[in-house]
Image (spheres, rainbow, N blue to C red):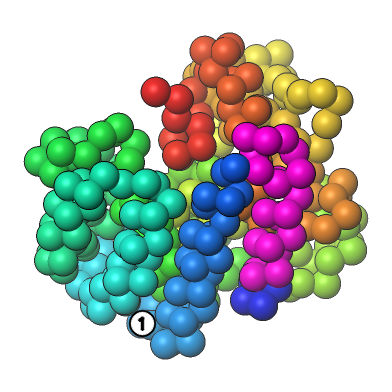
Amino acid sequence: METTSARRQIKSTLKVIKTRDAAYHELVDRFGLLFEKKEQVRTALMAANLQSPAVDADRMAAGMPVLGKENLTPWASAFRQSADSLLPVLAEVLQLERKTHRNLLAHLDNNENLLGLAQARIEGNRKHFENTSVQLGITPRTLLPYISEAVSAPVFCAIVCHLGESLSWEYGHCPVCGSFPSISQLTPKDVTDSEYLVGGGGKKYLHCSLCGHDWRYKRNACAACGNEDSESRELIYADGVKHERIEVCHKCGKYILNVDMREYASLPHLDTIQMGLIHLDVLAHERHLSPVSPTLWNTIN
Ligand SMILES: [Zn+2]
Ligand SMILES: [Zn+2]
């Protein structure tokens, strides 16, 4: 995606979320800066032409993502640049206690620790986050994964931005970094962007919770378990707003939020809009469903 349009989308999405109610107004005031700063870092890193990872077609055919076992050391300076830019903003928006902030900075000042968390994220190694949170005295348990994700995301985004749609993939996890999607979308109408060539829209894409890659997926299948049985799948929406809904799979008990881009006057930024859909996450939690991908917005402690 072209970066000026991403910046514009973030701003307009924040504006829309802000009008929803007082609680959302407050969230936008708190987190808005972080979304904009992350985009700035991503733009700077994209301009730096970072080395692209090698794509191994055989591995991918077996369902293994591009970055599965990749050593992240070649991108160490990009992770450092992102951490230095974003940690002060994160400390402010997350209202970190002074001691937590100090421990975090001391830990992430070491590149090995910084890359270790990014590596743990793409390997799905939750234990590493739990142990490091205990070691640094960081609570709640969702905080450190969120911080690491916020710092790593612009780097992964910049690393993978040239891989595009050429990847052949049919799974519910990201073909690039292996993470599960944070949201799904039905593509907009009449878009000339090369990512969405067909005019009618309505094709389902999953949006990676980490690297932001979007990939096509079967419209009637659960992203977590692949279930296609219509009897055990359900769409739930709130207050008659049908284009923002919860895709539920009763077979595995997971849900993912879905937005129908054909129904928006101006297209929302997919990472940002999730902060404005917390009312749907609350609804899903009331029904004892768990998110396909845990985020700061959907993890109710
Ligand atoms: Zn990804
Ligand atoms: Zn499922």
Q: Position of residue 28 (x, y in %)?
A: 60, 49
Of residues 200 and 81, which is closer to you in this image?
81
Q: Residue at x 64, y 70 (%)?
A: 7
Q: Residue furthest left?
A: 135
Quadrant of the rendering where the C terminus is positioned: top left
Left or right: where does residue 30 sit relative to residue 123? right
Q: Is residue 59 visible?
A: no
Q: Which residues are magenta?
A: 6-25
Residue 276 included in the magenta stretch of the image: no
Question: Measuring 12% from the left and 66% from the top, which residue is drawn there?
Answer: 110
Q: Secondary structure at mark 1?
A: loop
Q: Residues within 10 Å of mark 1 (few under 14, many from 20)?
A: few
All told, the count of numbered labels is 1
The x and y percentages for residue 269 are 67, 57
Q: Main secondary structure of the magenta part?
A: helix
Where is residue 163 shown, x and y percent of the image? 51, 72
Q: Residue at 39% across / 55% down in the picture?
A: 92
121 or 203, nearer to the observer: 121
Residue 13, given in percent of the width and then of the height, sits at: 71, 55
Q: Is residue 193 visible?
A: yes
**Image quadrant where residue 275 sits:** top right
Q: Decide: is 261 above or below 106.
A: above
